[in-house]
Image (spheres, helix red, strand yellow):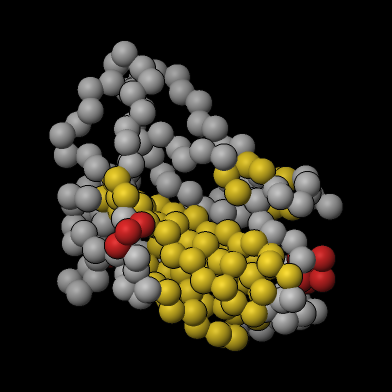
């Protein structure tokens, strides 16, 4: 059965940002792995701008588990920040035009939790919301007041069959050359062998 790949990923350094909020969110993704006996490992990866805005990750990060049938909250999952998982992405200079800008830096961290998702006739959706995007982004009005939402569906068939979500093979590049053609590898692997369907959509605001 075809499955729509609905994981949101890192935009090419346009960048995503708080006053007791954080103003630095660049992007992220969420996926899940079925462990059996209704247990699922949730993995949330978040990217932030090292320099522009308040440079802190959530501690803890809050993921809401909602019923698909009525959008009611079933459970809030709080995941502590692990400083050992705070990493800086290395720029991949794959073109002669590249000179690494001195003010571009991206940190990433991953939050992981195991949750119990009982069989439900409509399934669930997992949601993480965060304010705000970077003040350096140029195609949003007041980007430091615009949040982001990362979500993924766990459908009823996935619950019955102990299915896992697809995972992207590569992160998008941090840099692109102006006026040069480019390709971004958005291929993914589904551990259950399901076929994948891709669709472009508007990013979700939130928080």
Q: Which residue is drawn at 57% across and 73% down?
A: 114
Q: Which residue is drawn at 41% across and 34% down?
A: 173
The residue closer to the viewer here, 9 or 144, is 9
The C terminus lies in quadrant: bottom left
Residue 71 lies, in percent from the top left, at: 61, 81
On the picture, is 16 further left or further right than 125?
left
Q: Can residue 97 be seen in this view?
A: yes
Q: Is residue 141 visible?
A: no
On the picture, is 52 further left or further right than 26?
left
Q: Which residue lies furthest to the front in this view?
A: 84
Residue 138 lies, in percent from the top left, at: 27, 44
**Position of 201 relative to 158 (above/below):** above
Residue 33 lies, in percent from the top left, at: 64, 61
Q: Which residue is drawn at 23% across and 22% down?
A: 99
Residue 95 lies, in percent from the top left, at: 36, 17
- Residue 186 lies in what quarter of the image? top right
On the picture, is 146 further left or further right than 44?
left
- Residue 161 lies in what quarter of the image? bottom right
Total marks drawn? 0
Q: Residue at x 46, y 23 (%)?
A: 182
């Amino acid at each position: 059965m075809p499955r729509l790949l609905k994981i949101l990923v890192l935009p090419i350094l346009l960048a995503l940002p708080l006053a007791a909020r954080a103003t630095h969110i660049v992007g992220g993704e969420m996926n899940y792995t079925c462990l059996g006996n209704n247990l699922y490992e949730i993995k949330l990866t978040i990217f932030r701008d090292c320099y522009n805005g308040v440079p802190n990750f959530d501690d803890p990060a809050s993921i809401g588990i909602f019923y698909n049938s009525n959008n009611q909250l079933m459970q809030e999952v709080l995941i502590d920040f692990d400083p050992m998982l705070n990493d800086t992405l290395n720029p991949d200079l794959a073109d002669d035009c590249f000179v690494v800008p001195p003010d571009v830096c991206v940190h990433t961290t991953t939050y992981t939790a195991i949750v119990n998702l009982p069989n439900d006739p409509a399934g669930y959706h997992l949601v993480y919301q965060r304010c705000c995007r970077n003040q350096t982004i140029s195609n949003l009005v007041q980007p430091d007041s615009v949040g982001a939402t990362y979500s993924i569906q766990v459908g009823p068939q996935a619950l019955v069959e102990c299915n896992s979500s697809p995972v992207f093979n590569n992160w998008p590049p941090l840099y692109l050359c102006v006026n040069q053609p480019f390709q971004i590898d958005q291929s993914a692997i589904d551990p259950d062998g399901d076929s994948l369907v891709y669709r472009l959509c508007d990013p979700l605001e939130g928080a």
